[in-house]
Image (cartoon, helix red, strand yellow):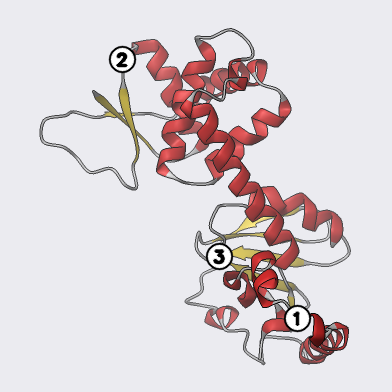
């Protein structure tokens, strides 16, 4: 079995599909560079990213799949799971050697796995949209640091751009060290050096605006007044708002 090693990018993944059809080596093992460990008796093939090859594969997939499946494909990639990369590769090869409609065969393990992973990523996307709470910084920008299970920033960008079109904001994925910055005109990807700005990780008082404390207090008072103690159902509450998201919620901060 040959080992294909790619750089973990979406373009690189598509190039592995192109290379497989060009070489047709049989069964392969797909590994991202970040987790690849050389083996003594196997010579891996390192996939070189070629935009033209990636574009040909992507156009081929778009011709084979409806929009909802194209989104599932992309969501599965954003999961960053190693088994997802392999499933995407196998799924792509499966599509290209079968007639239209092959993606509806849930008896195929890769079709099923893509659907399951994509559903998890979509769920994480919806939770981020619901649970993100911005803090108003002293320089007038609304900031929120997050560390989602999956790389959902590309999926939530339009939601926040449309909902908060009149505010400058930053949503930063601390785990993946990149974020989105909206400047009232466009959204662009940014990187922050937390060694130079460590206070952003701590929400220090001198970083936040003078009114931020008041906003937080008013929000907590609203939730306290809207709460009905007699109808408290902790089990149901945790089911809908898992504890791992509480760190984002102003109303949960003591």
Decide which of 142, 93 is in the foreground and name it: 93
Residue for point 54% across, 27% down: 111
Residue 43 percent location from the top left of the image: 18, 28
Q: Nearer the viewer, residue 37 or 50?
A: 37
> Dividing the picture into quarters, in which one does residue 71 lie?
top right
Q: Which mark is residue 26?
A: 2
What is the distance, in whole Å, between disc 2 and disc 3 at their CAs?
38 Å
Q: Which of the two discs, 1 and 3, sits closer to the camera?
A: 1
Q: Residue at x 61, y 65 (%)?
A: 172
User: Is the residue under label 3 in contact with that under label 1 (CB below 8 Å)?
Assistant: no
Q: Which mark lies nearer to you, 1 or 2? A: 1
**Residue at label 1?**
232
Please state, as top left, top right, bottom left or bottom right, where the N terminus lies in the image. top left
Q: Residue furthest left?
A: 40
C-alpha distance separating marks 1 and 3: 29 Å
Q: Residue at x 69, y 65 (%)?
A: 240
Q: Which residue is mark 3?
A: 147
Query: In this orientation, does residue 137 appear?
Result: no
Above or below residue 189? Residue 254 is below
Q: Is residue 181 left or right of residue 77?
A: right
Does residue 121 appear in this view? Answer: yes
- Label 3: which secondary element: loop
């Amino acid at each position: 079995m040959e080992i294909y090693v790619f750089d973990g990018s979406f373009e690189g993944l598509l190039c592995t599909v192109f290379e497989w059809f060009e070489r047709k080596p049989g069964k392969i093992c797909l590994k991202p560079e970040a987790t690849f460990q050389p083996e003594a008796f196997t010579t891996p093939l390192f996939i070189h990213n070629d935009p033209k090859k990636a574009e040909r594969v992507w156009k081929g997939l778009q011709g084979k799949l409806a929009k909802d499946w194209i989104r599932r494909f992309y969501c599965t990639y954003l999961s960053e799971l190693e088994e997802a990369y392999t499933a995407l590769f196998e799924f792509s090869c499966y599509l290209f050697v079968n007639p239209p409609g092959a993606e509806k065969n849930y008896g195929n393990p890769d079709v099923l796995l893509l659907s399951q992973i994509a559903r998890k990523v979509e769920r994480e996307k919806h939770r981020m949209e619901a649970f993100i709470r911005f803090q108003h910084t002293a320089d007038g920008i609304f900031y929120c640091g997050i560390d989602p299970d999956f790389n959902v920033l590309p999926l939530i960008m339009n939601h926040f751009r449309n909902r908060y079109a009149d505010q400058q904001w930053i949503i930063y994925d601390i785990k993946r060290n990149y974020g989105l910055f909206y400047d009232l005109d466009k959204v662009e990807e940014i990187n922050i050096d937390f060694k130079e700005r460590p206070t952003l990780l701590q929400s220090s008082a001198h970083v936040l605006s003078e009114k931020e404390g008041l906003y937080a207090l008013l929000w907590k008072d609203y939730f306290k007044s809207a709460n009905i103690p007699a109808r408290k159902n902790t089990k149901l509450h945790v089911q809908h708002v898992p504890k791992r998201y509480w760190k984002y919620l102003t109303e949960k901060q003591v």
